[in-house]
Image (tube, helix red, strand yellow):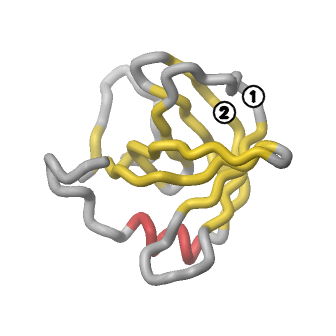
């Protein structure tokens, strides 16, 4: 289900979701709860973000049915306590990411 916020300048609809991804920062790994995705970006929850707008970010998203995660690179576009961290994708294997986008959203109450 696509969600539109009137005050956003989003070019594409986003899809609500709920899954853990892995942020890769140097030799460190951080689990992040992804809350929405779109063809050009995604948002994850973070109560105490260290990310800042403009930062480069690398994440591995799980793809159900595949042992190999989807590697995603992007730039942080916003960091807000209530909205989380927004990322614009700059590099991703588009066909595999499209498969993730095609999955049904979580059933309310079954979210992580």
Circle number at residue 91: none
Residue neighbourhood size for the residue with mark 2, other residues' Cα within 10 Å, grouped as few (<14), some (14–19), many (≥20): many
Mark 2–mark 1 CB contact (< 8 Å): yes
Q: Name the foreground residue: 10 vs 67.
A: 67
Circle number at residue 54: 1
Compared across the picture, whether 3 is left or right of 42 comes to left
Circle number at residue 76: 2
Looking at marks 2 and 1 on the same chain, the residue that comes earlier in the sequence is marked by 1
Q: Position of residue 112 (x, y in %)?
A: 31, 48
Q: Residue furthest front?
A: 28
Residue at the spot x=24%, y=57% of the render?
Answer: 106
Q: Position of residue 62 (x, y in %)?
A: 52, 66
Q: Is residue 31 above or below residue 76?
A: below
Q: Quadrant of residue 56?
A: top right
Residue at the spot x=62%, y=77% of the render?
Answer: 68
Is disc 1 placed on a helix, strand or loop?
Answer: loop
């Amino acid at each position: 289900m696509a969600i539109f916020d009137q005050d956003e300048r989003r070019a594409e609809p986003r899809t609500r979701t709920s899954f853990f991804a892995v942020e890769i920062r140097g030799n460190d790994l951080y689990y992040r709860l992804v809350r929405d995705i779109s063809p050009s970006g995604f948002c994850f929850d973070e109560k105490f973000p260290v990310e800042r707008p403009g930062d480069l970010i690398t994440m591995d998203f799980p793809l159900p049915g595949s042992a190999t995660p989807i590697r995603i690179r992007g730039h942080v576009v916003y960091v807000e306590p209530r909205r989380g961290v927004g990322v614009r994708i700059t590099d991703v294997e588009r066909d595999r990411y499209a498969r993730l986008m095609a999955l049904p959203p979580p059933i309310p109450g079954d979210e992580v």
